[in-house]
Image (cartoon, helix red, strand yellow):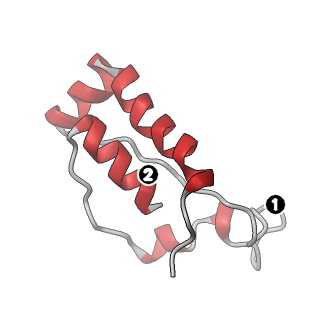
Amino acid sequence: MRLLERSYGEVTNLRRLPTVTRRMQNYYAFNFRRYEHALHPMTIGVIIETGFLTSSTDRRVILSDPERAARGIVEAVVAFPETPPPR
């Protein structure tokens, strides 16, 4: 996740908002104990929020230059297999 945050931020120049609510942490797609169709806990997964349409800065990147936003994601995905796991 940190690789994705760094790559997306560097490419788009959008800052990360550190707000993570309890409901976000218990999102159904990752809550395998509660939901039958959630990701297995050993499956790598992330929900990517590319920005907020209510923010003029975010909206400009998302709508005017979607290739740049996509490049920030792709660079992280391509680099991921070569990245050592966190300690």
Per the image, label 2 sits on a secondary structure element best described as helix
> Which dot marks residue 10?
none
Badge 1 amino acid: His
Position of 36 compared to 58: left or right?
Answer: right
Q: Which residue is mark 1?
A: 37
84 or 39, which is in the foreground?
Answer: 84
Q: Position of residue 43 (x, y in %)?
A: 74, 63
> Which dot marks residue 4?
2
Q: Looking at the picture, does residue 87 appear above or below residue 36?
A: below
Contact? badges 2 and 1 (CB < 8 Å): no
Crowd band around label 1 with a 10 angstrom C-alpha radius: few (<14), some (14–19), many (20+): few
Position of 8 compared to 24: left or right?
Answer: left
Badge 2 amino acid: Leu
52 or 17, which is in the foreground?
Answer: 17
Taking the spot 37% from the left edge, 46% from the top edge, the residue there is 7
Q: Residue furthest top?
A: 64
Q: Position of residue 15 (x, y in %)?
A: 21, 51
Taking the spot 53% from the left edge, 53% from the top edge, the residue there is 47
Taking the spot 42% from the left edge, 30% from the top edge, the residue there is 71
Taking the spot 79% from the left edge, 67% from the top edge, the residue there is 40
How far apart marks 2 and 1 lie (CA) works out to: 25 Å
Residue 72: which quarter of the image?
A: top left
Per the image, label 1 sits on a secondary structure element best described as loop
Residue 11: which quarter of the image?
A: top left
Q: Looking at the picture, does residue 59 appear above or below residue 39?
A: above
**Total tally of numbered discs in the picture:** 2
Q: Residue furthest right?
A: 36
Position of 38 compared to 58: left or right?
Answer: right
Q: Looking at the picture, does residue 12 appear above or below residue 17?
A: above
Number of the front mark, 2 or 1? 2
User: Mark 2 vs mark 1: which is more N-terminal?
Assistant: 2
Q: Position of residue 69 (x, y in %)?
A: 37, 31
